[in-house]
Image: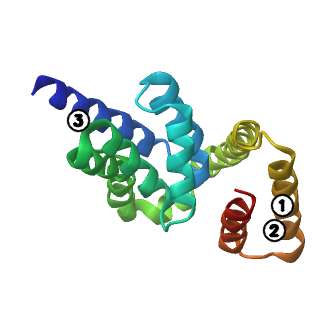
């Protein structure tokens, strides 16, 4: 039992920490999750992480799916619950604590300066995650080509991302 308790405690701490650092939306936290669960804790292999990430992209709520996936791999159903609650608890607590002071916070020079620093850092994190994922997930020229075409379609034609994800899945089935 101590092992199970330790796993749950480690999951709770890891996902509370990650939940407290979510800025810039779901993709910004992918690098943090990868560093924690693959490199830091060794809970998942890089392939397992990418499988969980892919699963999260074809379902609603990719961060919820990723947290639940990691928690389940580490400690079963209760681990899934611990990780999922952990990722959201800091954000929920922050909303509850700051709602009363929202007008003051929004008009604060300090808060605006803080957020203006977070924005470029988040873009940098997203670019780093994208490059790391591209190097891992695109070992073949056809994958690189489809990624380039997808990027072009997203930027030029503003197509919904889910359509491209579905098309990529179908392309994978066809190319086997």
For residue 172, side relative to residue 143 (left or right) = left
| Residue receiving disc 1 | 151
> Looking at the image, is 169 positioned above or below residue 67?
below
Task: Tell whether label 3 touches label 2 (CB within 8 Å).
Answer: no
The kind of secondary structure element at disc 3 is helix
The one of 118 and 70 positioned closer to us in this rendering: 70
CA gap, disc 1 and disc 2: 5 Å
Q: Residues within 10 Å of mark 2 (few under 14, many from 20)?
A: some
Q: Residues within 10 Å of mark 3 (few under 14, many from 20)?
A: many
Name the residue carrying label 2: 154
Query: In which quadrant will I find the C terminus?
Result: bottom right
Residue nearer the viewer, 122 or 132: 132
Looking at the image, residue 153 lies above or below residue 75: below
In the picture, the quarter occupied by the N terminus is: top left
Compared across the picture, whether 40 is left or right of 135 comes to left
- At 37% from the left and 40% from the top, the residue drawn is 15
Colour scheme in use: rainbow
> Mark 3 or mark 2, which is nearer the start of the sequence?
3
Query: How far apart are labels 1 and 3 at the CA level?
Result: 39 Å
Residue 8's disc number: 3
Residues at marks 2 and 3, CA–CA distance in whole angstroms: 40 Å
Residue 60's place in the image compared with 30, above or below, is below
Percent position (x, y) of residue 8? 23, 35
Q: Are marks 1 and 2 in contact (CB under 8 Å)?
A: yes
Q: Classify mark 1: residues with Cα within 10 Å, few (<14), some (14-19) or many (20+).
A: some
Residue 67 x/y as whole percent = 40, 48
Task: Give percent across and percent down for residue 54.
Answer: 57, 53
Q: Nearer the viewer, residue 147 or 131?
A: 147
Quarter holding residue 125: top right
Residue 56 image point, x, y percent = 51, 57
Q: Is residue 39 left or right of residue 88?
A: right
């Amino acid at each position: 039992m101590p092992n199970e308790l330790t796993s749950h405690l480690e999951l709770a701490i890891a996902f509370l920490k990650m939940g407290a650092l979510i800025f810039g939306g779901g993709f910004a936290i992918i690098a943090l999750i990868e560093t924690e669960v693959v490199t830091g804790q060794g809970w998942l292999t890089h392939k397992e992480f990418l499988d969980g990430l892919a699963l999260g992209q074809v379902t609603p709520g990719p961060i919820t799916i990723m947290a639940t996936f990691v928690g389940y791999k580490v400690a079963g159903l209760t681990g899934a619950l611990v990780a999922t609650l952990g990722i959201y608890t800091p954000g929920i607590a922050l909303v509850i604590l700051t709602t009363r002071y929202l007008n003051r916070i929004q008009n604060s020079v300090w808060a605006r300066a803080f957020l203006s620093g977070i924005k470029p850092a988040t873009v940098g994190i997203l670019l780093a995650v994208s490059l790391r994922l591209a190097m891992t997930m695109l070992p073949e020229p056809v994958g690189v080509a489809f990624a380039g075409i997808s990027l072009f379609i997203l930027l030029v034609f503003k197509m919904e991302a889910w359509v491209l994800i579905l098309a990529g899945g179908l392309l994978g089935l066809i190319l086997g």
